Image (cartoon, helix red, strand yellow):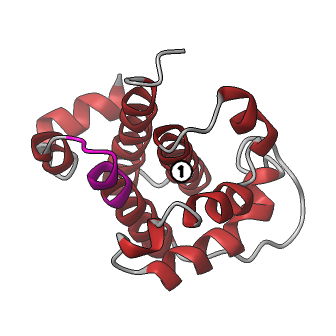
Amino acid sequence: MDHKTYHIGLWRYARDFFWAAERLRRYDSTENVTIYLYCHSMELSLKALLIYHGSTEKELRTIGHDLIDAWDRSTRTGLNQHLADFRGVKAVIELINPYYQGKEFEYLVPGIKQFPSLADIHNASEDLLQSVGKTIDIPITQLSRQLQPIDETTASALITN
């Protein structure tokens, strides 16, 4: 693994999952899939930061899909200094982690679930993606592109194809 660029690749994957979630949130109503995509973006963002600070792929594998573990390790790198809403992101991660780690957005698990609103999950994912991107020196042009709206024709084509 090339440590000089691996963190950038992980961050770009995080951005791609975020973009996919954005499109579903704006133009469809598949909430569980949208939440999964936002959560996966958060996981990859945190892992990109950890790689940037010297974690190995083996260390990332020990985290698995545990957002709280990834969060705890990331905050030791000074992540909290860069997040606009540190407590808000932490609260979302703490509430959503049992469902994400338990793969409840990927497989049907019966029962009542209580997790943050889709808007709160979106905001946490976006804040984390932006903050990590700035921390690991992603060019500003790549940071700002993620929020460009797509036109209705493109949105319709994305949904019907």
Q: Nearer the viewer, residue 149 or 147?
A: 147
Q: Residue at x 30, y 57 (%)?
A: 130
Q: Which residue reaches farthest bottom?
A: 87
Bin the neighbour count of mark 1 within 10 Å (Cα to Cα): few under 14, some 14-19, many 20 and up.
many
In this figure, which residue is indicated by the disc labeled 1?
46
Q: Residue at x 76, y 45 (%)?
A: 63
| 111 displayed left or right of 57 | right
Q: Quadrant of residue 98?
A: bottom right
Q: Position of residue 53 (x, y in %)?
A: 50, 45
Q: Residue at x 56, y 55 (%)?
A: 35
Give the position of the C terminus as an image quadrant. top left
Q: Is residue 72 above or below residue 26?
A: below
Q: Which residue reaches farthest top?
A: 1
Q: Is residue 34 magenta?
A: no
Q: Is residue 87 above or below residue 141?
A: below
Q: Which residue reaches farthest right?
A: 110
Q: Quadrant of residue 15?
A: top left
Q: Quadrant of residue 85?
A: bottom left
Question: How many discs appear?
Answer: 1
What secondary structure characterizes most of the magenta part? helix
| 148 displayed left or right of 101 | left
Q: Position of residue 21 (x, y in %)?
A: 42, 47
Give the position of the N terminus as an image quadrant. top right
Q: Amino acid at mark 1?
A: Leu
Q: Which residue reaches farthest front?
A: 54
Helix, strand or loop at label 1? It is helix
Q: Is residue 134 magenta?
A: yes
Q: Residue at x 24, y 36 (%)?
A: 156
**Span shown in magenta:** 131-138
Q: Position of residue 133 (x, y in %)?
A: 31, 49
Q: Position of residue 153 (x, y in %)?
A: 13, 36
| 149 displayed left or right of 44 | left
